[in-house]
Amino acid sequence: MKKTVFLGALTVAGLAAGAAAAGTLDDVKARGKLNCGVSTGLVGFAAPDANGEWNGFDVSVCRAVAAAVLGDPAAVEFVPTTGKTRFTALASGEVDMLARNTTWTFSRDVDLKFTFVGVNYYDGQGFMVPKELGVSSAKELDGSTVCIQTGTTTELNLADFFRSNNISYEPVPIETNAEAQQQYLAGACDVYTTDASGLAATRATFENPADHVVLPEIISKEPLGPLVRHGDDEWGDVVRWTLNALITAEELGITSANVKEMASAAGNNPEINRLLGTEGNLGEMLGLSADWAVAALSSGGNYGEIFEKNIGENTPIGLSRGLNAQWTEGGLIYSPPFR
Amino acid sequence: MTTLTDPPKQAFRLSQLIYDTRYRSMTIQVIAMIGFLILIGWLISNTAQNLADLGKEPSFRFLGEPAGYDINQRLIDYNNQDTHLRAAFVGLLNTLLVAFLGCITATVLGVIIGVLRLSKNWLVARLMTVYVEMFRNVPVLLWIVFVMAILIESLPAPRAFRGDNPEATMKVFDSVAVTNRGVYVPELLFGVDARDEKGEYLDAPTGWRVGLGDLPIGASADNPACASYYATEGAMAGEPGPGCGTFQISLDLMAVLFVLIAGFYSAHRIKLRADRIQEATGERPTTWYLRLGVVVVPLLIVLYALGAYLAYPELRGFNFRGGTHMRNSLIALWLALSLYTAAFIAEIVRAGIMAISHGQTEAAAALGLRSNRIMSLVILPQALRVIIPPLISNYLNLTKNSSLAIAVGYMDITGTLMGITLNQTGRELETVLLGMLIYLTISLSISAVMNWYNNRVKLVER
C-alpha cells in the first residue's frame, strides 16, 4: 500500500513528462490552437475582462504568435498559472509558451531548461508603502513586515536587499496578488513588494491610489519575457521572431492601421518588404506563411501600440515607456534586423 | 481387516494451474502481480527517460545549496544563507507544531462538545448540534481562510497603538498586544534583564544569576556558521562555539523542565503513598499542600537562581518587538483545524458514550456516585475503547490538512520544501517525493503511538 502511494507519484510525473514531445510548431498547427500560459489575473498584463475575453500586454504576445502561426489571433487557449505552477505547466507540455511576466534568470534558462526568446518588458523590483507611514526610502524599512508573493524571484531579491543593507524584516508569504492586496490594505503588512509594473497595476485598482507611494529604490533587474521549452529551436524561433516583428514594426512605423496597405505591394524600404513578406521568403524559413508578420501585427498592432493600449500613460496603470522605449529613443527595446 | 490404500498420486501437470481450483486463484494473483510490476517498471523507466531527455536527472544535491529565502516563523535558528535542507527542517517543525497544538485543542474541544451534545439541557444540546453540523459540512480550507480574514480585518494594525490617544491598547496589564499581525505575549527569558541603547534585550553576565546559556550541538570548525569563532583563540581551549552549531539547546529551559518533571513525579509518589495509607487505615491524609509544594517551590527556586524574567512586547518602529510573537497565520490555521476536527471528534465521543450500556450509569448511580464522577470514572474510560481507533484517523486527517497552510502563508513543510524550494530549484519530482515521504513518516508515527495507547486501554480478553 505504501509502495503504491510512492509509485502513484511517479505515475503522475511520468505521464506529465511523457506529454512533452518535440515539434511544438507542428503540434500547434495540428491542434489549430495555441496553448498559452498567462498569469491568474494582473490587470494590464493578463486579465479577463467583463466578457471573459483575456486582455493585456502579455496576452497580446500570445495573440500575435497565434496570428502568425494559425492566422487567427483568437485561436488561443489561455491557461492561467500561478508563480508556482507556471514552470511545471510549460515543462510538462500543458502550455506551448509562457507569457507571464517571468524574469529571465540564469538558473531558469540553464538549470530549469527553458529558452527565453527575448524581453518584452524591462522591470525591476520596487516597494509600495502607505503614505501615512512617512517612509521615503527602502533603507528606512528596518523591522517592517513585508508582503511578498511566494515562488518568485522577488523573494530572493528581498532577502538579498535586506541582508546587504543589514536591516531586518518579517516576510509574509502570500500565494496570489489579490490576497496580498487584501493583507496590505488591512495593514497586516507595512510594505508590499513585487515588480514595479505589478505595483503600479495593483495600485491602480485601489480605492485611493494617492494614499500609497512606490519608493524610489528599484532593487533588482527583472527582464520579463516570453519563454518556451529548451530544445525545440524551431518553435523558439517562431516566438522569438514574432516578438521581434512587433518591436521592429514600431521602429519602422508599421501600425495595425497601415499594415494591410503596406503589405499590399512592395514599397521602397526593403526591410519592411522582407518583414511583411512582399520580398524574400522569411516566412517560409520559419515554417510559416509569407504574411505571418502581417497577421501578427493586425492582431493588436506593434509593440508601442500594445504598450499604450494596455499599460501606457493613458490607462489606469499609467506606466511611462522609460527603459521600454525603442533604442532610437533612448530605451532598451531593440530587435535584431530582419535580413 | 481392511486395507486402506492411498489413491494413486497424480503427478503435477501444468494445466492444473488453470483448471484446478486449488491453484487457479494463485495463478491469477501471480499474473496480476507480474502485470502490475511491469506497469510500474514502465512508469519508472518512462519517467527516468523523460527526465533524462529534459536533462534533469533526479538528484538531491540541491538540498545542500543555500536556500536564499527567509522564513518568518522559525523554531530553530535559520537565515537565508542556510541550506534548503535546513529550510525544509524549519518547515517540518512548523508542521509538527501546528499538528501538535491542533490535535490537543481538537481533542479537548471535541470531548467537551461530544459530552454536551448528550446533555439533557435542550438549548446546550441543540447548540452543540448546530456547531457540529456547521463545521463538518464546510470544507476546512474555507474555515482557514475565513478565520484568517476575520483576524486580519477585525483586529487593529500595530499603527493603531501609536500616538498619545491610540485607537487600540494592550490587554492584560499592558502585557499582551493583540494585532492583525498576530498576538504578542510576554516571553520567559533567563539571565539579566539588561538592554542596549536600541532597547534590545542583552545577555549581560553579571553577578551569579546569569542563566546557563545554550549548548550548541554540532559546532565544529567545518560548520560555516562557526568559522569566525573558530578563527579566534577561544577555540584553542576546545570550548564549543557560542551562537553557532547545527542546533542550540537552551540549558536553562532544560533545567526548568527537569525540575518540573521531578516535581510532578514526587507529587505522584505522595499520592500513591496517600492511597496506600487510605487502603490500610481507611483514613486519607491531607496531602494537597505537600503535592503543590514539591512542584512549585523547587520551580520558583530554580527560576530565581537562573535569573528568569519576562520580556514584554513593546511597539518600536513598524512592529511590536520583544515577547513571543504568535503569528496570525499560525493562530488561523490552528483554530480552524482544531474547530473543524473537533466537530468530528465530538461525534466519535458521542458514539463512544452511547455505546456504553445505560445499565452502567444506573449501577454507578446506585453506588452513590455523582453524575460528573459517573462520566469521568465509569463511562468515559469504557467509551475510550470505542473512541480511540477512529480518533487516530482524525489526528492523521488534521496533520494532513495542515498542508493547506500556504492559504494563509504559514510556512510549513509544504510551503518551504514543496513550495519555495521547489520553485527556486525546479526539482519537482525530488521535492514532492521527499515531502510525501515526510508526511508518510509523520502519519505512521502518530498511528504507532496511538495504537500503542489503544492497546493499553482496550479490554483485555482472556
Image (spheres, coloured by chain):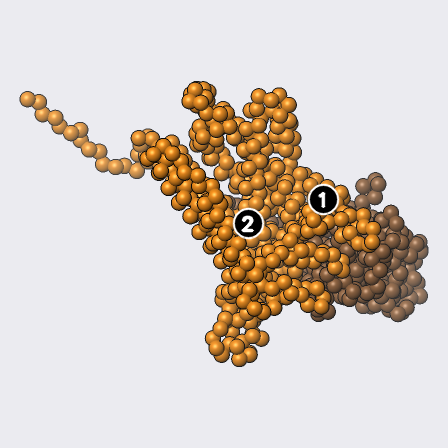
**Compared to A335, does B16 lie above or below?**
above
Task: Kindly identify which chain the residue marked by label 2 belongs to.
Answer: B
Residue drawn at point x = 50 percent, y = 25 percent: B371
In space, the residues marked 1 and 2 are separated at their CA atoms by: 23 Å
Secondary structure of the residue carrying tag 2 is: helix
Amino acid beneath label 1:
Leu
Answer yes or no: are tags 1 and 2 on the same subunit: yes
Q: Is residue B209 left or right of residue A218?
A: left
Query: Which residue is the site of mark 1?
Result: B151
Residue drawn at point x = 78 percent, y = 52 percent: B161
Q: Residues within 10 Å of mark 2 (few under 14, many from 20)?
A: some
Query: Which residue is the site of mark 2?
Result: B96
Residue B188 lies, in percent from the top left, at 60, 56
Residue B10 lies, in percent from the top left, at 22, 33
Of residues B69 and A172, which is closer to you in this image? A172
Residue A141 lies, in percent from the top left, at 77, 62
Of residues A317 and B188, which is closer to you in this image? B188
Residue drawn at point x = 52 percent, y = 41 percent: B396
Instruction: Supply the letter of whichever chain is brown.
Output: A
Secondary structure of the residue carrying tag 1 is: helix
Task: Kindly identify which chain the residue marked by label 1 belongs to.
Answer: B
**Compared to B336, does B361 lie above or below?**
above
Instruction: Supply the letter of whichever chain is orange.
Output: B
